[in-house]
Image (cartoon, rainbow, N blue to C red):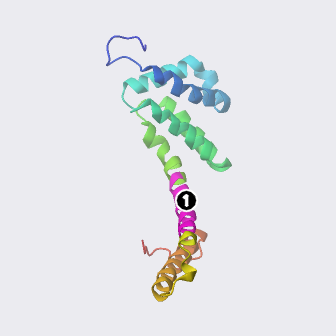
Amino acid sequence: MSLDPDPKTRIPSNFWIEVYPVLDLCENELSKLYDQYGRWGILDKLVTKYRAKKIKSVIHFRRIMEAYDVADDATKKTVLQRLRDYVLDEDLETRRAFDEFVVDNRRVQGAVAACEDFVSQIKRLKIDYALNRKEVIKALERVIEFAEKLRNKLEGTDPNAEEDDG
């Protein structure tokens, strides 16, 4: 299929490399699906899905693996059910199926990195030796207020959680 001279029907060679971990995941975690269709049957379904342009890029197979890898124990079952649906439903596009699991994790990791970066930058500035402290104190008070509101929302203890201070 990768040697097909017609670029419209050719399957890129990296398809096989990227799909391999997904097939292994199906074998290891979706035994009923794997027993029913086998490796070749699942692969045929994914090739059909690729040709139907529901796999926009073979790199999107990595989203499936990332969704599974970042999921906690409760979410893993949902990810696996989505993988089963994804294999069986030719019209289910990869990003639509798995982005909810990946994007949230990326947002959380981005927020953690931003917090760590903020603390690191403030430490590097050695602001505690500044002479004009009033402006910095006002800015830090805004940071503290924002951080406390956000923490309360995340903990579920904010009575004004419906308000979005953005």
The crowding category of the residue bearing disc 1, from other C-alpha atoms within 10 Å (few below 14, some 14 to 19, many at least 20), is few
18 within the magenta span = no
Residue 108 spot, x, y in % from top left = 54, 58
Is 145 positioned to the left or the right of 1 in the image? right
Residue at left 60%, top 27%? Answer: 33
Residue at left 60%, top 46%? Answer: 70
Residue 94 spot, x, y in % from top left = 45, 37
Nearer-the-camera pick, 38 or 135: 135
Which residues, given as a range, are shown in magenta? 106-121
- What is the quadrant of the C terminus in the image? bottom left
Q: Please give the residue where the numbered disc 1 appears in the rendered image.
A: 113
- Looking at the rendering, which quadrant does residue 82 occupy? top right
**Residue 12 vertical placement versus 26 (above, below):** above
Residue 132 spot, x, y in % from top left = 47, 87
- What is the chief secondary structure element of the magenta stretch? helix
Residue at left 50%, top 33%? Answer: 61
- What is the quadrant of the N terminus in the image? top left
Task: Name the element at disc 1.
Answer: helix
- Looking at the rendering, which quadrant does residue 41 occupy? top right
**Residue 111 vertical placement versus 5 (above, below):** below
- The amino acid pointed to by label 1 is Ala
Residue 11 spot, x, y in % from top left = 41, 19
**Residue 153 vertical placement versus 28 (above, below):** below
Nearer-the-camera pick, 73 or 60: 60
Q: Give the number of marks.
A: 1
**Residue 41 vertical placement versus 106 (above, below):** above
Nearer-the-camera pick, 134 or 16: 134
120 within the magenta span = yes
